[in-house]
Amino acid sequence: MPFNIPNLLTWARIVLIPLVVGVYYMPLPAHEQNLIATVAFVIAAITDWFDGWLARKLGQTSAFGEFLDPVADKLMVAAALVMLVKLGRADAIVAFIIIGREIAISALREWMAKIGASRSVAVSFVGKLKTTAQMIAIPLLLYHDPIGPLPVATMGMWLIWIAAVLTLWSMGYYLSKAWPEIRERTL
């Protein structure tokens, strides 16, 4: 495993996951729990963008980094969604759609890579939109408290449902791209 700055940022993202979840089990006022979890999640989300950019900029890309980065992303999102369901701030069906899609598409990408057809399931624009909606919705739902006149929780709820719709759309997109290979090899 290469120790470089991008991989250390990815590991930092993984280390922040227990903080996002664990803060809700600490004897703190709810507002402080929300603030700490939100800040930790936002820092983790920023490192997600920054580690990839830095790896390309410094020429420090690695097979291990390419493996670990999406794992860290999925763990971070799944942990936050499970916590949001527990807190009653997100619907379990939304969490199931988002987490289920991540598992299914990860498996699809792995299978497509094994058969040499990984380009057909490369990251798409709708996938990036889905990720953007998620990464804005989750901190809004973690923070939950209004900011002045802004109904943060309501905005987060709308965005997480939009993210769920985009999740289904992107899954359909990836499956349609992979369908020729699936049909050729399984039917």
Image (cartoon, grey):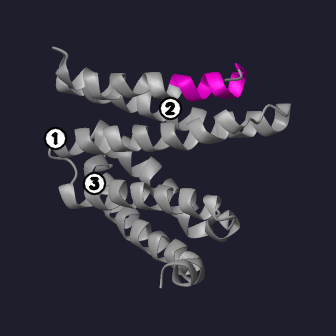
Q: Is the magenta stretch mostly helix, strand or loop?
A: helix
Q: In the rendered structure, which amino acid carries the disc numbered 3?
A: Ala
Q: What stretch is highlighted in magenta?
A: 3-12
Residue 26 occupies quadrant = top left
Q: In the rendered structure, which amino acid carries the disc numbered 1?
A: Lys
Of the image marks 3 and 2, the number of the one nearer the N terminus: 2
Q: How far across and how far down the image is residue 157, in percent?
A: 28, 56
- Residue density around tag 2, few if under 14, some if 14–19, many if 20 or more, within 10 Å: many
Callout 2: helix, strand or loop?
Answer: helix
Q: In the rendered structure, which amino acid carries the disc numbered 2?
A: Ala
Identify the image quadrant of the N terminus.
Answer: top right
**Image point (20%, 47%), residue name:** 89
Instruction: Give the spatial CA distance, label 3 vs label 2.
Output: 19 Å
**Image point (44%, 44%), residue name:** 74
User: Residue 11 magenta-drawn?
Assistant: yes
- Residue pointed to by mark 2: 44
**Image point (27%, 57%), residue name:** 96
Q: How far across and how far down the image is residue 114, in percent?
A: 62, 59
User: Residue 145 magenta-drawn?
Assistant: no
Extreme residue toward the top, this view: 27
Q: How far across and how far down the image is residue 86, in percent?
A: 16, 41
Q: Is residue 26 left or right of residue 45?
A: left
148 shown above or below 168: above
- Residue density around tag 1, few if under 14, some if 14–19, many if 20 or more, within 10 Å: few
- Residue pointed to by mark 3: 95
Q: Is residue 95 left or right of residue 114?
A: left
- Residue pointed to by mark 1: 86
In the rendered structure, find residue 61 and report the number of the disc placed on it: none
Callout 3: helix, strand or loop?
Answer: helix
Which of 168 and 108 lies nearest the eye of the viewer? 108
Can you see residue 145? no
